[in-house]
Amino acid sequence: MSDEAVMRWDPYSLTNDEEFDVFWKRHLAVRERQLLLVVGKGFDVRALETARRLRALGANIDVWLLAFHNGQEDSDERRKRTDDNVQGLSLLFPADRIKEIPIDLGGAFQDPIASLKTYEQIRAAGDAMAYDDVVVDISAMPRMVAMTSVAVLLHWLDNPPGSGKCVNLHVTTAESVTADLAAGRGSLRDQVSFVRGFSGELTALTTKDLPHVWLPVLGENQRDRLDRIYQKLTPDEICPVVPFPTRSPRRGDEIIFEHRDLLFDTFQVEPRNILLACEYNPFEAYKQVFEAMDRYRRALNELGGCKAFVSPLSSKLLSIAVLLACYDHLYGQIPGRRLKVGIPYVETATYADPAQQQDDPFELYSMWIRGEWETVDKAQLATEQAGTGLVFLERDADTGEEPD
């Protein structure tokens, strides 16, 4: 029997900016749908883009507003930007359609609890199974809140009580490297934290002798995070993942150059271990990360297996790619022994004031990651969704390239 794993998101459904309205207009027209929109109560200038676009299309929407806080006083600038976003949301939807969900991120000098609290609060917020579509807009969410929100809802909808109905799950984000870099860096926590359910059994005594493989997905200004995660994991093998292709042709080279002494002198990374992942296609990046993890799984199975850790240190699109690759290895169609999978990260403790501008360019992405397209014949769904902008992309079996 083949030991090749089957990738869940190959083919995949992805729409970006110019296709967003087309896809959602037709998706909503197929039948009457009740939507749940999960958004962050944040200061990011892109916080309301998904809400505005869906509201303009006449979608029937309830909102879960994730109000995260770290126990510290916000600056006047961050408070004003957050209040402006909340007011903007209230102009889009009546008060009885918005449910605020508090999420305690823990103080700057406390143990990191963001992922655990996000999991607990979303599970207690209401019944996601009551909706036809759940849309998680991660544009204004901290990284751990965003990844945990998607992970808990994906697992919840994948494992409904009883027979359950098929609920669609979508992830949207207004992607902008410029706006991300201008969001305000602040200071980092001392401790490394893990997305809930993705610890990789790092401290388990029964698996302590398994090799540690680390795939840090690189972005700008990540030296401190890289060093802290490295000290925590003490990896046996490191495979840095560099964004390429990118909107800016030299971005990948510049990221490597910025971290060159840490990667090659301190971590002793072999240049041949560097992987490339598409900056603007999270599903192609997912495939690259998934396949790299699977090569280690197959190579080390005869020796008892290994632990694979993937750190999302780049854009939010690539963070979703990391989550999907790890989720698929944990719960997907994997023959034989599975990897121990972990998602380590170092959270921001305090935020500096953002330098984002209202006119910072961005692209709005919508990823359909579970639901109807998985459970019905794809030809039938293609007929129902004709002209929707829905994209099912699959590599050519011989060339490995996407169709035109």
Image: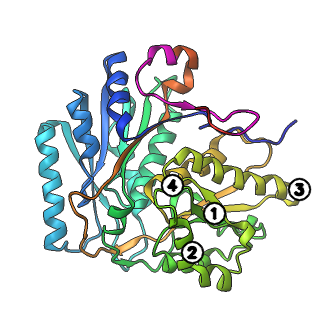
Assign a secondary structure to mark 1: strand
Structural crowding at the residue carrying mark 2, measured as other residues with C-alpha within 10 Å and reported as few (<14), some (14–19) or many (≥20) = many
In front: mark 4 or mark 2?
Answer: 4
Q: Earlier in the sequence, mark 4 or mark 1?
A: 4
Look at mark 3 in the image and give the residue it sits on: 302
- Is 382 colored magenta in this rendering? yes
Q: Which mark is residue 309?
A: 1
Q: How is the image coloured?
A: rainbow
Assign a secondary structure to mark 2: helix
Measure the C-alpha gap from mark 3 to mark 4.
34 Å
Q: Which mark is residue 279?
A: 4
Number of marks present in the image shown: 4
- State the image quarter where residue 297 is shown: bottom right
Measure the C-alpha gap from mark 4 to mark 2.
22 Å
Q: Amino acid at mark 2?
A: Ile
* Residue in the image at 36% along x and 48% along y: 363
User: Can see residue 239?
Assistant: yes
Assign a secondary structure to mark 3: helix
Q: Which residues are magenta?
A: 381-400
